[in-house]
Amino acid sequence: MALASVSILMMCLIFAKVIQFHTVLLCIVFGMTGFFINGSLPFFFELGAEIAYPVAEGITSSVTKFTDYFLQGLFLIVSMGHFGAKWMTWVTMVTCAVTTLLLFFVQAKYNRLLLDKKKTVLPD
């Protein structure tokens, strides 16, 4: 997530013309952003399932996706106004950075893993 924040920041700086525009650089930054953000999604689903255990994984993933889609819908509805589109990249970068910082405060208890270890005696 930290690398995703950095790549989105680079994108913001390219669009703000602080970093000189190069098509190859922009393609690399877009690729990095997609790789880092989409690569972290399965970890967030797993973390949500661990934190919410014993609630079923289907329920936690459904709530996660519903919240995701709802916030994306709000984001797109607000962008339909007369605000332009430059703010969208900056909001994405700030959101990603704040989420990264908030991850330091998450204390996951791996109750599912502990239950699996109790059921299955692992050889030493």
Image: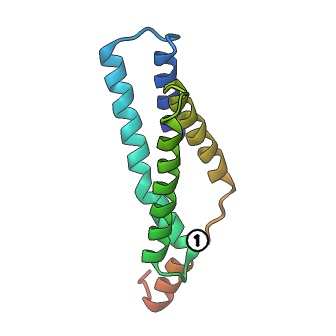
Residue 85 visible to an observer of this rendering? yes
Q: Position of residue 112 (x, y in %)?
A: 51, 79
Other-residue count near label 1 (Cα within 10 Å), few / some / many at <14 / 14–19 / ≥20: some
* Left or right, residue 62 beside residue 96: left
Residue at image x 45%, y 55%? 69
Above or below 52: residue 85: above
Q: Position of residue 14 (x, y in %)?
A: 46, 16
Q: Position of residue 21 (x, y in %)?
A: 39, 11
Residue at image x 50%, y 68%? 63
Above or below 63: residue 14: above
Residue at image x 65%, y 59%? 106
Residue type of the residue flagged with mark 1: Ile
Residue at image x 46%, y 24%? 11
Q: How many marks?
A: 1
Q: Position of residue 45 (x, y in %)?
A: 46, 63
According to the image, what is the colour scheme of the structure? Answer: rainbow
110, 49: nearer the viewer: 49
| SS category of the residue bearing label 1 | helix
The residue positioned farthest toward the top in the image shown: 20
State the image quarter where residue 124 is shown. bottom left
The residue positioned farthest toward the right in the image shown: 105
Q: Which residue is mark 1?
A: 51
State the image quarter where residue 91 is shown. top right
Above or below 43: residue 94: above
Residue 110 visible to an observer of this rendering? no
